[in-house]
Amino acid sequence: MNNYDVVIVGAGAAGLSAAQYAARANRSTLVIDRAGSGGQCANISELENYPGFPDAITGEEFTERFERQARQFGAEILTADVEAIERDGDRFRIVTDGGPIAAATVILATGARHRELGVPGEAAYGGRGVSYCATCDGPMFSGQPMVVVGGGDAACDEATFLSKLTDRVILVHRRDRFRAQASLAERVLANPNIEVRFNTEVEEILGGPNHFGIEAVRAVRLRDTRSGEITEESAGAVFVFIGSDPQTDLVPFVERDAAGYVVTDGEMASSVPGLYAVGDVRTTPFRQLVVAAADGAIAAHAASHRIDMLTDAIVATATR
């Protein structure tokens, strides 16, 4: 059974950042991901808000650079399906479809899966007007009409953010009232740039060629759930905020918050010693690539320190 100092499950920005820092600290490091490197980042058409990249870069190229840098420091990357993470005393056993792997520490970077509307056009225009992050993609659609879907805190927060970029935001919610905190809801309702449509659902996302000649979101078909009336609204982008599901099935034994995200301390340590959580899978107030990358660096540093402590304890026991 192969044995590593640090095994990272998930090869998005958080996982690859952790790999770089762990390998650079001269720790034997393995990254495992069922789909290869990139995570959600690989689907970004234009990444323009990552520090140090003043010119937009594709998520695919960004991921390639992240991976290349991690490999240059000695990290290994394995495409495999992780079936279980098991505690083995002070260590861990990672069960994959290619066999078991032993690790002194584990960094969980499995992310969270955005809930989707499941309507026609959503998948077809993903990364071309359909987005799940207003902070990431909103500025690309400045001045254009936008549609926000959802009724919780995230939807209200992001609609408010987008209202600073355009004077036409339609906030669609299928219920007759917001689920968001009262202060957030009141702010949205008082915003002249936001039109709220309760009891309304998205029926279809429509596309057409944009000014670059690329097929992208051009309109949204909406249905009033009370009257059944169908309307069509022009839109350059649709932002979906109906929740997300953290990918924590592999670690049912760690502490999680009410929404299911892994609870960590400032060193990204979970409730289980030696197991760290980074990026969108953990409880965090701000989900961005730069935050995920920072999480990975912190976790790798903490994991390296733990390995030193374990080594010192073994040496001390052997010399007694």
Image (spheres, rainbow, N blue to C red):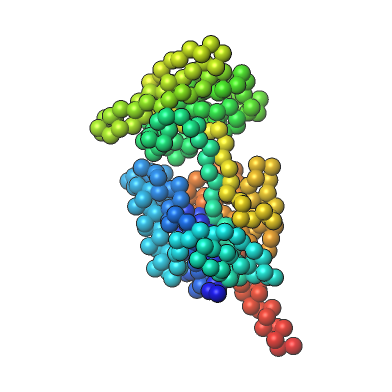
Q: In the current view of this chain or complex, which residue is farthest to the bottom?
A: 319
- Residue occupying image coordinates x 37% and y 26%: 206
Q: Is residue 10 visible?
A: yes
- Residue occupying image coordinates x 45% and y 61%: 79
User: On the image, which quarter does residue 258 sit in?
Assistant: top right
**Residue 165 placement (x, y as % from top left):** 43, 28
Instruction: Give the camera-side residue of 216 and 13.
Output: 216
User: On the image, which quarter does residue 146 sit in?
Assistant: top left
- Residue occupying image coordinates x 63% and y 47%: 261
Q: Which quadrant holds the N terminus?
A: bottom right
Instruction: Give the camera-side residue of 30 and 95.
Output: 95
**Relative height, residue 43 to residue 145 (above, below):** below
**Residue 9 placement (x, y as % from top left):** 53, 59
**Would residue 84 appear left or right of 236 to someone viewing this image?**
right
Q: How many marks?
A: 0
Q: In the current view of this chain or complex, which residue is farthest to the left?
A: 213
Q: Is residue 197 visible?
A: no
**Relative height, residue 14 to residue 258 (above, below):** below
**Residue 214 placement (x, y as % from top left):** 28, 34
**Relative height, residue 185 to residue 107 (above, below):** above
Q: Which quadrant holds the C terminus?
A: bottom right
- Residue occupying image coordinates x 69% and y 78%: 313
**Residue 157 placement (x, y as % from top left):** 55, 31
